């Protein structure tokens, strides 16, 4: 009998450990939102700025393949002159740099690579899809996602990027899977509220 109960306790412990590691990220390009989900609970929701037309964020099923807190782009950034003034805001590394100037790679703090050069990171959100393929988040949310995911965490990117540059950053947002969104009302970021558990 003792062995039987020991077996039951071991199964419960393993099941609990699996449930705790059942974390995934879902990125909705149409709504420009990212969701951190554990099991059947929504833990975090963040506005994003994904890849613009010509540099669309790839859709599909991926996994986090790299985490780097202080990452810099090897391709994109800005060009500054000898006095440090920005002369080309949206530059790439192949552009000609004037005498005395230099190329400054774009900072991508709390970088979570999930597909080729694309990753989630802290960055500027103008209110529409504007990146070169990465998924930008407000810094506080990028830190929270960075701390919650591991290399190997599943990332699903779905939806179609809006063609207009006017998705609503603030105010009510539709919730995925046709469910009402209990997190409406926060201007920039939503944090899981245990009083409003989400299950699907």
Image: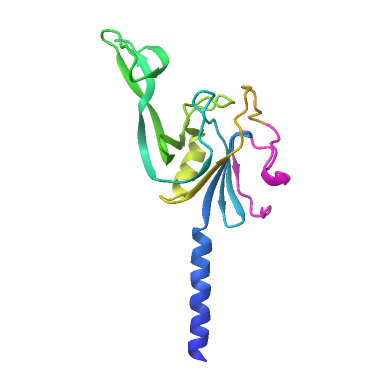
User: From the viewer's perspective, is residue 121 above or below residue 38?
Assistant: above
- Residue 155: x and y, percent? 50, 46
Q: Is 173 displayed left or right of 3 in the figure?
A: right
Which of the 4 image quadrants contains residue 175? top right
Identify the coloring.
Answer: rainbow
Q: Residue at x 61, y 22 (%)?
A: 165
Q: Residue at x 49, y 70 (%)?
A: 14
User: From the viewer's perspective, is residue 62 above or below residue 41?
Assistant: above
Which of the 4 image quadrants contains residue 48? top right
165 in magenta: no
Q: Residue at x 37, y 11 (%)?
A: 85
- Residue 105: x and y, percent? 35, 24
* Count of marks, rendered view: 0
Residue in front for this viewpoint, 96 or 106: 96
User: From the viewer's perspective, is residue 51 above or below residue 34?
Assistant: above
- Residue 53: x and y, percent? 54, 24
Residue in front for this viewpoint, 188 or 93: 93
- Residue 25: x and y, percent? 53, 46
User: From the viewer's perspective, is residue 2 above or below residue 193?
Assistant: below
**Prevailing secondary structure of the magenta residues:** loop
Numbered range of the magenta stretch:
171-200
Residue at the far left in the pictured view: 100
197 in magenta: yes
Q: Is 38 displayed left or right of 92 in the figure?
A: right
Q: Residue at x 38, y 43 (%)?
A: 67
Question: The C terminus is located in which quarter?
Answer: bottom right
Residue at the far top in the pictured view: 99
């Amino acid at each position: 009998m003792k062995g039987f109960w020991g077996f039951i306790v071991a199964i419960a412990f393993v099941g609990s450990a699996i449930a705790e590691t059942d974390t995934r990220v879902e990125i909705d390009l149409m709504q420009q939102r990212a969701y951190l989900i554990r099991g059947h609970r929504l833990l975090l929701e963040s506005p994003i700025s994904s890849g613009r037309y010509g540099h669309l964020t790839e859709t599909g099923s991926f996994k986090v393949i790299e985490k780097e807190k202080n990452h810099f782009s090897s391709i994109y950034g800005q060009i500054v002159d000898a006095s440090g003034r920005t002369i080309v805001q949206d530059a790439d590394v192949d552009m000609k740099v004037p005498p005395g100037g230099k190329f400054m790679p774009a900072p991508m703090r709390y970088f979570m690579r999930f597909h080729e050069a694309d990753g989630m990171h802290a960055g500027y959100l103008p209110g529409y899809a504007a990146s070169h393929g990465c998924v930008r988040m407000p810094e506080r949310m990028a830190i929270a996602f960075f701390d919650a995911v591991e290399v190997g965490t599943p990332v699903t990117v779905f939806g179609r990027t809006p063609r207009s540059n006017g998705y609503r950053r603030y105010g009510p947002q539709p919730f995925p899977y046709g469910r009402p969104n209990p997190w409406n009302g926060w201007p920039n970021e939503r944090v899981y509220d245990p009083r409003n558990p989400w299950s699907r």
